[in-house]
């Protein structure tokens, strides 16, 4: 059930409509404290969806929302769940997204 919900939600995190994208990120930010460690089965699919386009966005609202989601993940999930997906993303990102993820890894 959780996979079905987040499969659909993941598409909204990369929606071409910036308003939909920003609201999806803000909703994710609100869901993280509620779901906490129950996110572990879907974290490997959510982090790429959040990071790939959103942390390098030129839209300041989307970029801020993406940074808030990453911060919430770091606050509410065990670090070992985030280590592998963050390391994988840090290898292949560029720009401010690479800097933001590298800072979280440090």
Image (cartoon, helix red, strand yellow):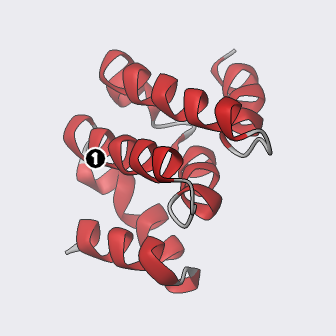
Instruction: Indicate left or right for 62 with 45 as reference.
Output: left
Compared with residue 2, is residue 62 higher up or lower down, i.e. above or below? below
Image location (x, y in percent) of residue 24 = 59, 29
Reading the image, the residue beneath label 1 is 71
Image location (x, y in percent) of residue 38 = 42, 24
Q: Nearer the viewer, residue 39 or 24?
A: 24
Compared with residue 67, is residue 100 higher up or lower down, i.e. above or below? below
For the point 49% across and 82% down, which residue is it?
95
**Which quarter of the picture shows residue 77?**
top left
Q: Nearer the viewer, residue 46 or 95?
A: 95
Compared with residue 105, is residue 8 higher up or lower down, i.e. above or below? above
Q: Nearer the viewer, residue 78 or 103?
A: 103
Looking at the rendered image, the quarter that the C terminus falls into is bottom left
The number of numbered discs placed on residues in the rendered structure image is: 1
For the point 69% across and 30% down, which residue is it?
20
Instruction: Indicate left or right for 17 with 81 as reference.
Output: right
Image location (x, y in percent) of residue 101 = 37, 69
Give SS at disc 1.
Answer: helix
Instruction: Indicate left or right for 62 with 34 as reference.
Output: right
For the point 20% across and 40% down, which residue is it?
75
Crowd band around label 1 with a 10 angstrom C-alpha radius: few (<14), some (14–19), many (20+): few
Looking at the rendered image, the quarter that the N terminus falls into is top right
For the point 27% across and 71% down, which residue is it?
105
Compared with residue 1, is residue 80 higher up or lower down, i.e. above or below? below
**Which quarter of the picture shows residue 19?**
top right
């Amino acid at each position: 059930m959780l996979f079905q919900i987040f499969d659909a939600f993941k598409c909204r995190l990369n929606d071409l409509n910036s308003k939909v994208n920003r609201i999806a990120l803000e909703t994710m930010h609100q869901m993280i404290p509620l779901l906490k460690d129950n996110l572990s089965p879907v974290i490997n699919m959510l982090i790429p969806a959040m990071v790939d386009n959103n942390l390098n966005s030129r839209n300041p609202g989307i970029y801020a929302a993406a940074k808030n989601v990453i911060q919430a993940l770091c606050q509410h999930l065990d670090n070992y769940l985030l280590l592998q997906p963050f390391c994988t993303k840090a290898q292949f990102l560029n720009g401010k997204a690479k800097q933001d993820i590298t800072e979280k890894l440090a």
